[in-house]
Amino acid sequence: MADEPAEPADEPTTAVELGVDGETPPAPPKPARSHVQLALIVGTAVVVALAALTGWLGYRAYESRQTAQLQDLLVAVGRQGAINLTTIDAAEADKDVQRILDSATDAFYDDFAKRSQPFIEVVKQAQSKSVGEVTEAGLESVSGNEGQVLVAVTVTTSNRGAPNQPKRSWRMRLTVKKTGDDEAKVSKVEFVP
């Protein structure tokens, strides 16, 4: 058997190959992230932060625009409500009263609707004519979709017994309530000193 090649002898396993405890050694530590990877991570974080900031600023701008539109609507309806209430002509009293009712809601509508017919009769009998002109209007407060509008009005009045009366100045607080997407109506009227 001298011709047969000798089988390789099993080489002994050393402690270095198995580790100190006889287990396989831990994997070598991962190499540190490269500068490119760090730049990508930081860049992604910055883009995400900017996108969030842009979204938040866009939403705030949208809210501000919505608030400004609501305030403008409330003041415009308050101004028109004051003009409607102070511009009455005996020749068109029915139309004038209907215009007031069309711009009214809630308790003010109910109250004015009950008194409208006697009011029309008094205006027609006196041959009264009044023309209101808003001199100032501003939003006093807003709560949800409702606001109080202060309106200063100068009213020129004439009737059968006194054709040339001096102008009168009045101040009104009108509560205006949003009733639709782009619609609001007067829900309460108070005369203030």
Image (spheres, helix red, strand yellow):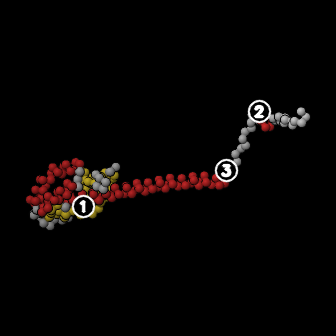
Q: Position of residue 125 (x, y in %)?
A: 8, 59
Earlier-in-chain disc, 3 versus 1? 3
For numbered disc 1, what is the local secondary structure? strand
Label 3 – label 1 distance at C-alpha: 74 Å
Badge 2 or badge 1: first in the primary sequence: 2
Q: CA distance from mark 2 to mark 1?
A: 99 Å
Residue under the image location 17 percent in, 57 percent down = 97
Q: Mark yes or no: residue 172 visible.
A: yes
* Quadrant position of the N terminus in the picture: top right
The residue under label 3 is which amino acid type?
A: Arg
User: Number of numbered discs present?
Assistant: 3
Q: Answer with mark 2 or mark 3, whichever residue precedes in sequence.
A: 2
Q: Residue at x 57, y 53 (%)?
A: 44
Q: Which mark is residue 189?
A: none
Query: Is 165 in front, or is 103?
Result: 103
**C-alpha span from label 2 to label 3:** 32 Å
The residue singled out by tag 1 in the image is 153
Mark 1 neighbour density, 10 Å: few (under 14) some (14–19) many (20 or more): many
Examine the image and state in which quarter residue 172 appears: bottom left
At a point 18% along the width and 49% down the height, the residue shown is: 111
Whether 40 is drawn above or below 11: the answer is below
Q: Quadrant of the C terminus?
A: bottom left
Q: Secondary structure at mark 3?
A: loop
Give amino acid for label 1: Val
- What is the x, y in percent for residue 56? 47, 53
Mark 3 crowd level (few <14, some 14–19, many ≥20, 10 Å Cα): few
Residue under pointer 3: 33
Residue marked by disc 2: 22
Which tag is nearer the camera, tag 3 or tag 1? Answer: 3
Residue 169 visible in the current orientation: no
